[in-house]
Image (tube, rainbow, N blue to C red):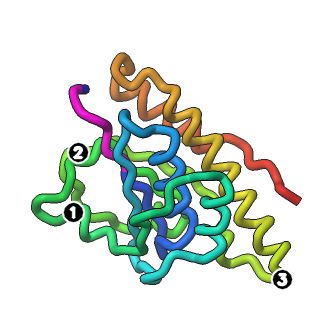
Amino acid sequence: MDRPCNVLFLCTGNSARSIMAESILRGIGAGRFNAYSAGSTPKGIVHPLALELLASHRMPIEGLSSKGWDVFAAPGAPALDFVITVCDNAAGEVCPIWPGRPTTAHWGIPDPAAAEGSRAEQLAAFRTAFDALDARIKAFVELPLETLEPAELKRRLDQIGKMPMASSL
């Protein structure tokens, strides 16, 4: 490919998981990937614990915002190479028609923004989600995208989505 791959991470609220995925890929895939995130029903704000955790891992946080997925289906939107859902709700929703006919995958991650309890317990939920996304995105970045046939690429993306999650507790 003669340009960076455009990757869109989707979640319902676009406040935590998809935002973290966008930041992680921007951080470790710079030059090879353009990372974006959006939601079907965006909350309009990025969760403060997501920003705190990303900053503590020295991931880029500038420009992160909670926005609707319609931005990426509009005329003039970047041609998407990959669309990855990171929550079960977004995976089950009828998505817009994406420009660029992207390869899709589902990497379900429990919603850390739904965690209750003390600040430490909530932060542990964000760490668990971050660690799972970080591991999956690192596996994605290591794929030989230029040489994989479309069916094999889809199979590998689906395998990445089934990677086990470790607990940060």
Circle 1 Cα neighbour tier, 10 Å, few/some/many (<14 / 14–19 / ≥20): some
89 to 161, vertically: above or below: below
Tell me where residue 16 sits by quadrant. bottom right
The residue identified by callout 3 is 117
State which mark lies toward you, 2 or 1: 1
Foreground tag (3 vs 2): 3
Could you tell me the amino acid type at mark 2? Arg
Residue 76 position, x and y percent, is 12, 59
Cα separation, mark 2 vs mark 1, equals 11 Å
Q: Determine whether the residue tagged by mark 3 lies in a helix, strand or loop.
A: loop
Q: Amino acid at mark 1?
A: Ala
Residue nearest the viewer, comparing 59 with 78: 59
Label 1 sits on residue: 73
- Name the residue rendered at 55%, 59% in the picture: 20
Which segment did they paint magenta? Answer: 2-7
Please name the residue shown 67% across and 49% down the image: 132
Q: Position of residue 11 (x, y in %)?
A: 48, 66
Element at label 1: loop
Horizontal arrangement in the rendering, residue 36 relative to residue 161 (left or right) = left
Percent across and percent down for residue 100 are 20, 45
Lower position in the chain sequence, tag 2 or tag 1: 1
Who comes first in sequence, dot 3 or dot 2?
Answer: 2
**Residue type, label 3:** Gly
Indicate yes or no whether the magenta region holds residue 50: no
Quarter of the picture holding the C terminus: bottom right
Q: Quadrant of the N terminus?
A: top left
Cα gap from disc 3 to disc 1, whole angstroms: 38 Å
59, above or below 126, in the image: above
Q: Which residue is mark 2?
A: 101
In x, y percent, where is residue 137?
55, 41
| Lateral position of residue 97 relative to residue 145, left or right | left
